[in-house]
Image (cartoon, rainbow, N blue to C red):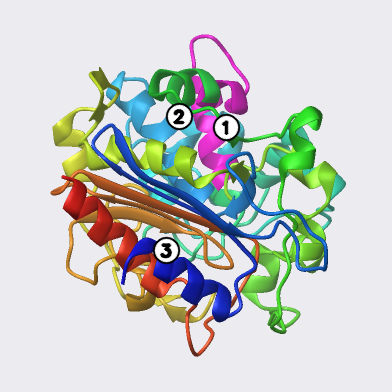
């Protein structure tokens, strides 16, 4: 099935708007759009200017920022977070290391219980409150996925180790996006860009966690991942480094091309090949129960990215050496370190494990098109 056929199939299966792209090395070989920016009559067509919330795909960009600082000798993965952010040692978290956070084994995935949509945009308030969280588990002992807190903890470590003292969003723009020529990846969307963002929706009932569960503490009901919340302009303007990126597929795939290129794209080297390949090493506890979601653990590599995906989301099938990250509702960033292929899919219909995954064939088609272009 070619890319256009896969796009049509995705729309037939319930997708509304899609942006998809693939790179081979530094060459953009696929950049396609289909569908509408909203699930309503008369909505405009998705085009090359349309942007989409990408949820946890953002985590891969935040992890890349950490690896840049490690490359520069400014962060040691196995040093306590409190080495760089002393306040984080509060309430027994002094042994939590940067690697524990990267691999979702810090043991403290909770968010402040009084978080609100407005407070998502208050960086200082969030990190001050996260420093006071009581750990649920000893660090390094269990998988406990950090849907939100992952980004602020690592983002604050990057901010505090940055000799220029930049805000995290500025660091990402200046140290990742600009060197790679990425124009449309945003943490903290400018108000002038708001009209370009596609409207999220879902046709399924979104299951929300039961009150009192660790999941409900990690993603409190007031900020649960729903179209209603993530269609709000004030949430788009917030810098949410674990789940708040807004982008097009071309930009996401370009960032992942850095990983597919083993740290280098178009003569721009940001990470060493040795470091990128080390990220493929499985983390301790791979496949064990995740205490946040009460499901098998997120298949993370040694330092921040997924190294496998559920079969219906893995481009070209399983078994590849890929660094990747999926986002709530089905967004995807993916990089194959052996072929140099990177892939991204952005869309505006959030789905949760449908019986006929509407985007599975698209990932495979992108991969085959990129292979043919090599």
Secondary structure category for the residue under label 3: helix
Secondary structure category for the residue under label 1: helix
Residue under the image location 71 percent in, 80 percent down: 203
Which of the two labelled residues, at mark 3 and mark 1, occupies the earlier sequence position? 3
Indicate the quadrant containing the C terminus: top left, top right, bottom left or bottom right. top left
Find residue 169 and report its horizontal and vertical position in percent: 61, 28
Q: Is residue 129 left or right of residue 82?
A: right
Q: Is residue 121 visible?
A: no
Q: Which residues are magenta?
A: 151-172
Instruction: Give the residue pinned by disc 1.
Output: 156
* Residue most extreme to the top: 164
Count of numbered marks: 3
Which of the two labelled residues, at mark 2 and mark 1, occupies the earlier sequence position? 2
Find residue 354 and report its horizontal and vertical position in percent: 54, 85
Indicate the quadrant containing the N terminus: top left, top right, bottom left or bottom right. bottom left
Distance of label 2 from label 1 (alpha carbons) = 12 Å
Residue in front for this viewpoint, 150 or 368? 368
Distance of label 3 from label 1 (alpha carbons) = 42 Å
Dominant secondary-structure state across the stretch colored magenta:
helix
Q: Is residue 353 left or right of residue 29?
A: right
Residue in front for this viewpoint, 24 or 189? 24
On screen, residue 23 above or below 145: above
Q: Is residue 349 visible?
A: yes
Residue under the image location 32 percent in, 77 percent down: 311
Q: Which mark is residue 4?
A: 3
Which of the two labelled residues, at mark 2 and mark 3, occupies the earlier sequence position? 3
On screen, residue 151 above or below 171: below
Secondary structure category for the residue under label 2: helix
Instruction: Give the residue pinned by disc 2.
Output: 83
Which of pointers 2 and 3 indicates the residue nearer the eye? 3
């Amino acid at each position: 099935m070619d890319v256009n056929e896969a796009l049509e199939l995705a729309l037939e299966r319930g997708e509304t708007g899609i942006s998809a792209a693939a790179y081979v090395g530094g060459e953009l070989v696929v950049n396609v759009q289909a569908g509408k920016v909203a699930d309503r009559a008369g909505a405009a067509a998705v085009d090359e200017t349309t942007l989409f919330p990408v949820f946890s795909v953002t985590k891969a960009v935040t992890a890349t920022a950490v690896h840049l600082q490690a490359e520069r000798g400014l962060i040691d993965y196995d040093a306590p977070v409190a080495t760089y952010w002393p306040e984080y040692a509060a309430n027994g978290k002094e042994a939590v290391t940067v690697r524990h956070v990267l691999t979702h084994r810090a043991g403290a995935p909770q968010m402040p219980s009084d978080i609100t949509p407005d407070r998502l945009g208050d960086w200082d308030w969030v990190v001050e409150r996260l420093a006071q969280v009581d750990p649920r588990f000893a660090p390094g002992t269990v998988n406990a996925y950090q849907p939100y807190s992952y980004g602020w903890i690592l983002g604050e470590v990057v901010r505090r180790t940055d000799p220029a003292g930049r805000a995290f969003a500025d660091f990402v723009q200046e140290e990742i996006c600009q060197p790679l020529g990425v124009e449309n990846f945003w943490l903290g969307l400018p108000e002038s860009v708001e009209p370009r963002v596609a409207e999220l929706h879902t046709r399924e009932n979104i299951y929300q966690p039961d009150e009192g569960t660790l999941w409900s503490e990690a993603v409190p009901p007031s900020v649960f991942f729903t179209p209603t919340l993530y269609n709000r302009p004030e949430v788009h303007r917030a810098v949410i480094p674990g789940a708040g990126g807004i982008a097009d597929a071309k930009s996401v795939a370009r960032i992942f091309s850095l990983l597919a290129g083993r740290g280098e794209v178009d003569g721009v080297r940001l990470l060493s090949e040795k470091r990128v390949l080390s990220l493929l090493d499985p983390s301790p506890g791979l496949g064990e129960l995740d205490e946040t979601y009460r499901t098998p653990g997120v298949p993370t590599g040694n330092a921040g990215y997924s190294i496998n995906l559920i079969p219906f989301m893995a481009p070209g099938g399983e078994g590849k050496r890929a660094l990747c990250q999926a986002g709530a509702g089905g967004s995807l960033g993916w990089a194959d370190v052996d072929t140099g292929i990177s892939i991204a899919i952005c869309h505006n219909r959030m789905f949760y494990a449908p019986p006929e995954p509407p985007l599975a064939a698209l990932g495979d088609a992108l991969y085959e098109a990129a292979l043919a272009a090599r």
